[in-house]
Amino acid sequence: MEIAHEAVRLFTERGVQATSGEDIARAAGISPRTLWRYFPAKEQCVRPLLTRELDRVAARLVELPAGRPLAAAVEDDGEHQDEGPDADSTSAVRALIRLTRQEPSILAVWLQVHHEAEAVFAGVLAERLGLPADSLDVRVRASMINGALRSASEDWALAEVRDADAVSPPHRNAVRRAMRIVADGLDC
């Protein structure tokens, strides 16, 4: 996680192109060889920050008892409040999502993380629905959840950019709202 934080700091200060893997390694206090052992490209260094919330939601979906609506996985956060990211991680994730608007390589990592999460969501849904994970019903539902989580995160991260005087609500509020929209269906 320390490597991810240093990568975000350097990417936001210098830009992705002007930051080398060696710069990230030096800032994190590790050797470049160690950095490259864990991350195939410098942009991949931010993955741990981007996957943390998706992993948390996926784990909550797996734990959710049969018969409970999927939206309950993000609604019932009371006993799981301590699982959330710290303020530094929240700030770093917000900065990363904002970087996706101008840095195609960071956008690629963001989309890759969500693509991989969608397969996890499909597995959970397949088990709940008793259908194959590659069925259209499962895949569409998994993409709805994934799209809702991605859109909620982007909306949260960009809220203060759209309205400089506004303070955005916590990320989890955006996620809860997005899951409620999915649960309400597509009544257009």
Image (tube, rainbow, N blue to C red):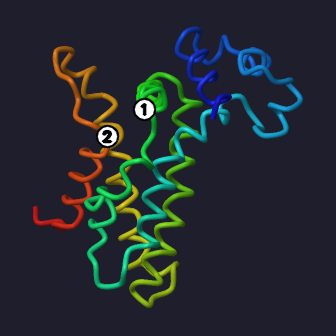
Please state the horizontal and vertical placement of residue 104, each as a whole percent of the image.
54, 29
Name the residue at 46% across, 67% down: 121
The reply to whether discs 2 and 1 touch (Cβ–Cβ < 8 Å) is yes
Residue at the limit of the structure toward the left, as seen here? 188
Q: Position of residue 111 (x, y in %)?
A: 51, 45
Within 10 Å of disc 2 (Cα), the crowding (few <14, some 14-19, many 20+) is some
Quadrant placement of the C terminus? bottom left
Identified at 45% across, 49% down, the residue is 83
Secondary structure beneath disc 1? helix
Which residue lies under the disc numbered 2?
Answer: 171
Quarter assignment of residue 131: bottom left
Type of residue at label 2? His
- Label 2: which secondary element: helix
Q: Earlier in the sequence, mark 2 or mark 1?
A: 1
| Residue ID for mark 1 | 90
Q: Which x, y percent locates residue 167?
A: 21, 24
* Type of amino acid at the residue the image marks with label 1: Thr
C-alpha separation, residue under disc 2 versus residue under disc 1:
8 Å
The answer to whether 139 is drawn above or below residue 91 in the figure is: below
